[in-house]
Image: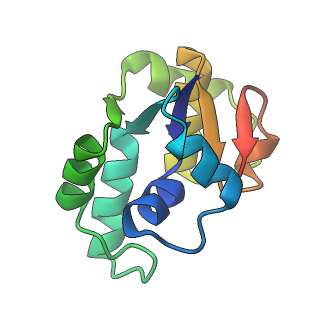
Amino acid sequence: MIILLDTHLLLWAATGSSKLSRKATDLIQDETNQLLFSAASIWEVAIKTGLDRPDFKVPAGRLRRALFDNGYDELPISGRHTAAVANLPNFHKDPFDRILIAQAQVEDLMLCTSDSRVATYPGNIEHV
């Protein structure tokens, strides 16, 4: 299965956080899964680290390198992804989450998220 992980799951996995659920850990550790991270997640980390958000303390470049080192593949943001955001219901306003949802829909990927609001969108989204 090809899985796109949301930003918090990426951060928790990279830092070994106890916030990472057993279900998420099992999906990440299953070697038959291909794990993806979005360029949008790296952008989100860069912005929110610069704003001194306490839940974003990993430098974006270091996170990106660590994800590659651990076998993740990067999903670039395309025009198709950004255009698909316009088709999403407007009940969640976070632009980073919205692009992840659109990417998962356009690319027919499973999006794994820790955000229950994201999990209410249509598509292959798993709340873990």
How many numbered markers are drawn?
0
Find residue 21 and report its horizontal and vertical position in percent: 66, 62
Q: Is residue 106 left or right of residue 51?
A: right
Q: Is residue 46 left or right of residue 12?
A: left
Residue at image x 81%, y 43%? Answer: 120
In the depicted structure, whether residue 77 falls above or below residue 61: above
Asked which colour scheme the image uses, the reply is: rainbow
Find residue 60 and report its horizontal and vertical position in percent: 24, 59
Task: In this rendered view, identify the residue nearer to me: 40 or 114.
Answer: 114
Task: In this rendered view, identify the residue nearer to me: 10 or 47.
Answer: 10
Residue at image x 52%, y 44%? Answer: 28
In the depicted structure, whether residue 40 falls above or below residue 32: below
Q: Is residue 90 left or right of residue 81?
A: right
Find residue 7 and report its horizontal and vertical position in percent: 47, 54
Q: Is residue 93 visible?
A: no
Task: In this rendered view, identify the residue nearer to me: 5 or 86.
Answer: 5
Q: Is residue 123 visible?
A: yes
Residue at image x 25%, y 50%? Answer: 64
Residue at image x 57%, y 74%? Answer: 18
Quadrant (top left, top right, bottom left, bottom right) of the N terminus: top right
Which quadrant of the view contains residue 126? top right
Which quadrant of the view contains residue 78? top left
In the depicted structure, whether residue 115 falls above or below residue 51: above
Q: Is residue 70 left or right of residue 120?
A: left
